[in-house]
Image (tube, rainbow, N blue to C red):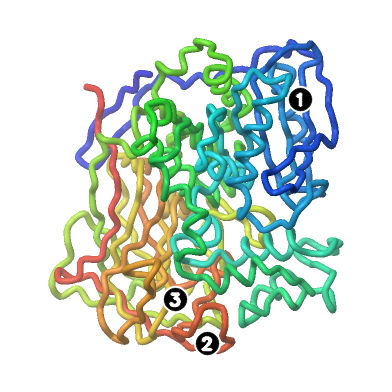
Amino acid sequence: MLVRIFLSFTGVVLLASEPVRFPEAYPPTNDVVMENLVPVPMRDGVTLYADVYRPARPGRYPVIVSRTPYSTERYPSAYADAVFFAQRGYVFVYQDVRGRHESEGKWEPFRNDIEDGYDTIEWAARQSWSNGKVGMQGGSYLGHVQWRAAMAAPPHLVSIAPMVAATSLYHDWVTLNGGWRLSFNFGWGPVRQESRIMQNTGPHTMTGGPESLSYDRVLWHLPLIGMQELLGRNAQFYRDWIRHPDYDDYWKPLNAEEVFDRITVPALNIGGWFDIFSQGTLRGYMGLRQKGKTEAARRGTRLLIGPWGHGPSQKTGDIDFGPHANVDVDAVQLRFFDYWLKGIDNGLDREPPVTLFVMGANVWRQEQDYPLSRAQLKRLYLDSNGKANTLHGDGRLRWEPPADDSPPDRYRYDPDNPVPSLGGNNCCGTPTPAGPIDQRPIEQRGDVLVYTSDRLAEPVEVTGPVKVVLYAASDAPDTDFIAKLVDVFPDGRAINVAEGIVRARYRESLSAPKPLEPGRVYAFTIDLVGTSNLFRRGHRIRLDITSSHFPQFDRNPNTGEPFGMSARVRVANQTVYHSRQHPSHIELPVVPSTAP
């Protein structure tokens, strides 16, 4: 695809580009038969059950396996996927994971999915309707179990297509690099998966415990270890998660990133810039592309990432990204499986491996790599006269390093009055809206530091990983720092495009936490994962710094006590430095010109 752009010293102006042409699904060619409750034996004697959708015409076909825990919550699109692929010449095996719905055994999230995935794939390859080639498909949990199966390298697995999926349960799911995802973990875990049947009596109201309780109210409970008891829940896995807040041997076997070099099959990674698992989507692509065991895994792996939350859409949060933002992912997956499972020469191997959506420009673009090798890392430095609190303060972002006498900024973080979550990377029924949302309501708070650039004379495209290096001190033994990259529109709207968190005890290692020395200045690195956003002419680039994002993340109590075990909190007094000695900055991958 040809892209013509005009280079400025800070960025890029898109002048014209050929649109990316996404595949359209060809018409169905098969009637479908469905077998219900098909037994699939596991190596330990447990039987899992699946619905098998097959073309009615006898023959041997490639197989797509999808494994789900969502027993009573199956949604029409899940069955639609099975019918869609079966009508186009695939057998679709739609299986309940261990301990869910019809399948036997005890369900422990993620724990049995390596062995069960392997056994299911090899079973599918042996059936009379199979040609011996098996792929996997599905999103979220259904995407993560694909990584788990691929870790075991089943001989008949040919390709996987994880969508909006984590690669590491610790780094991408339960935490974001150590920051505990409270509303998601509790809502997805004890509330939805390991609970008695509940009735919805309101948008965020649940019954089933001693009394009806608001989801919002429950999330305030401390200690975290006792939260589920308010609803009469008893999820052992949730207690285990809380008791393993560090990246340890409990989590390492659940991390595909530890063994990318053992994975032999290519992956079609599909995700969204605002998805809760965007990091998994990006790391899945980068990890296999760089470390996959086979040439097929390395060269065949693909990335498709749009301006979405937990699935494709045109509008996310406050922003409508235009009619081309939404994509028929079934058609994209069909083309991928046709190439790998049917051996159809459809040109997939001759196309760029990366397709990403540039927000702001609202266009799709194909790339040869991610991160983009042509991106130039540029720093915007924090600066102020010591009063960067609120959007009405004097916080600035400058391309030049700050002067020696730049005074620090200060704020109080009170866990009893946290900054409320407003947009960002969340999903799945949590009580706060996700996606790009105007941040001005929380930028009015004194415990939010706001640093804003001058209006841009030329557009600046930021595509790739984003990180903040923050020189800061606290009078607490542990605390959090949160950063948001924000696009400020000429009309004042402040739209978040990327975010990240660092838990201070994990500043050096997620496996070996260390308390802070009160008052000491540390260099904290905050990973904002990644984005692709064109900051247009007349817009401004903004960075928000604070210490809470509740209830998307739990409130750090600032006490340094064992995670999840204490009901005690204390106020933390935070100081952010931006002098020549302590040059706090955000590092942006700015895309320069690729054409004259």
Using the image as rendered, state which of residue 166 and residue 60 is in the foreground: 60
Which secondary structure lies at badge 1?
helix
Q: Nearer the viewer, residue 101 or 556?
A: 101
Residue identifier under label 1: 83
**Which quarter shows the C terminus?**
top left
Q: Earlier in the sequence, mark 3 or mark 1?
A: 1
Whether residue 317 is visible here, answered yes or no, is: yes
Q: Position of residue 99 (x, y in %)?
A: 75, 53
Label disc, if present, on residue 569 of the rendered structure: 2
Q: Report x, y in % for residue 540.
A: 36, 51
Residue type for callout 3: Asp
Say few, some or many: other residues with alpha carbon within 10 Å of mark 3 (under 14 / 14 to 19 / 20 or more): many
Classify 289 as above or below 560.
Answer: above
The one of 217 and 67 positioned closer to us in this rendering: 67
Asked if disc 3 and disc 1 are in contact, CB closer than 8 Å, the reply is: no
In this view, the mark in front (3 or 2): 2
Relative to 274, say whether 388 is above or below: below
Q: Nearer the viewer, residue 210 or 398?
A: 210
Q: Amino acid at mark 1?
A: Val
* Label located before the other in sequence (2 or 1): 1
Residue under numbered circle 3:
447
**Could you tell me if residue 392 is visible in this image?**
no
Q: Does 517 sit above or below residue 507?
A: below
How many neighbours does mark 2 have within 10 angstroms: few (below 14), some (14-19), or many (20 or more)? some
| Residue at disc 2, secondary structure | loop
- Mark-to-mark CA distance, 2 and 1: 53 Å
- Left or right, 316 with reference to 350: right
Image quadrant where one finds the N terminus? top left
